[in-house]
Image (tube, rainbow, N blue to C red):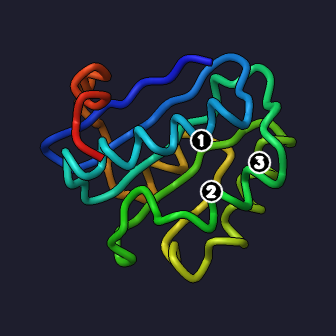
């Protein structure tokens, strides 16, 4: 699996993107690093783009564990969106949404990136990459 984080300072949009084969362990690692990224950037909204995933091998148990964790963006009022075009990934994302609805009331699962941008109210994000080495070195 590969992943990246990008941030648009003008809109405050933080985006995490996943690609390739995703296992339970890798998904947990992504989530933990996304939490560090959110603490560092203090976004006003967030998108997780799962459209680049070619093989989703994370277990339903892992998805439930993630839903029980502290949200990546802890402010309950902020919008967050998961983009999941593939049917299997969409189903797992919806399960994550339903298991975490008390701590993520403004989470939306959509099939297209365009829909995600409409929800967060950003038309043309100007992303800058977040340095992953800086995140890995940040205190937990």
Q: What is the C-alpha distance between the residues marked 1 and 3?
A: 18 Å
Q: Earlier in the sequence, mark 2 or mark 3?
A: 2
For image coordinates 35% across by 77% down, the residue present is 77
- Check disc 3: other Cα within 10 Å, few if <14, some if 14-19, many if 20+: some
Where residue 89 sits: x, y (%)? 78, 42
User: From mark 2 to mark 3, how far is it between C-alphas?
Assistant: 15 Å
Residue in the foreground of this view, choosing between 62 and 129: 62
Q: Residue 118 at x, y = what percent?
A: 44, 54
| Residue topped by disc 1 | 28
Quadrant where the N terminus sits is: top right
Look at the picture and state if 47 lies above or below 94. above
Q: Nearer the viewer, residue 8 or 41?
A: 41
Residue at the spot of label 3: 90
Q: Are marks 1 and 2 in contact (CB under 8 Å)?
A: yes
In the shown orientation, is residue 55 left or right of residue 122?
right
**135 shown above or below 63:** above
Residue occupying the point 33% across, 72% down: 75
Rendered image quadrant of residue 67 = bottom right
Of the residues tagged 2 and 3, which is closer to the observer? Answer: 2
The mark closer to the camera, 1 or 3, is 1
- Asked which secondary structure carries label 3, the reply is helix
Q: Secondary structure at mark 2?
A: helix
């Amino acid at each position: 699996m590969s992943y990246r984080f990008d941030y648009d300072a003008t809109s405050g949009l933080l985006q995490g993107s996943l690609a390739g084969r995703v296992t339970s362990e890798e998904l947990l690692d992504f989530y933990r690093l996304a939490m560090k990224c959110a603490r560092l950037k203090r976004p006003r909204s967030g998108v997780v783009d799962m459209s680049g995933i070619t093989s989703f091998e994370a277990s339903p148990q892992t998805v439930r564990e993630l839903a029980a964790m502290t949200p990546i963006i802890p402010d309950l009022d902020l919008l967050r969106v998961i983009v999941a075009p593939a049917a299997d990934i969409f189903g797992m994302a919806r399960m994550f949404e339903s298991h975490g609805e008390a701590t993520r009331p403004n989470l939306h699962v959509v099939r297209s990136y365009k829909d995600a941008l409409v929800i967060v109210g950003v038309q043309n994000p100007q992303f800058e990459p977040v340095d992953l080495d800086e995140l890995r070195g940040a205190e937990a």
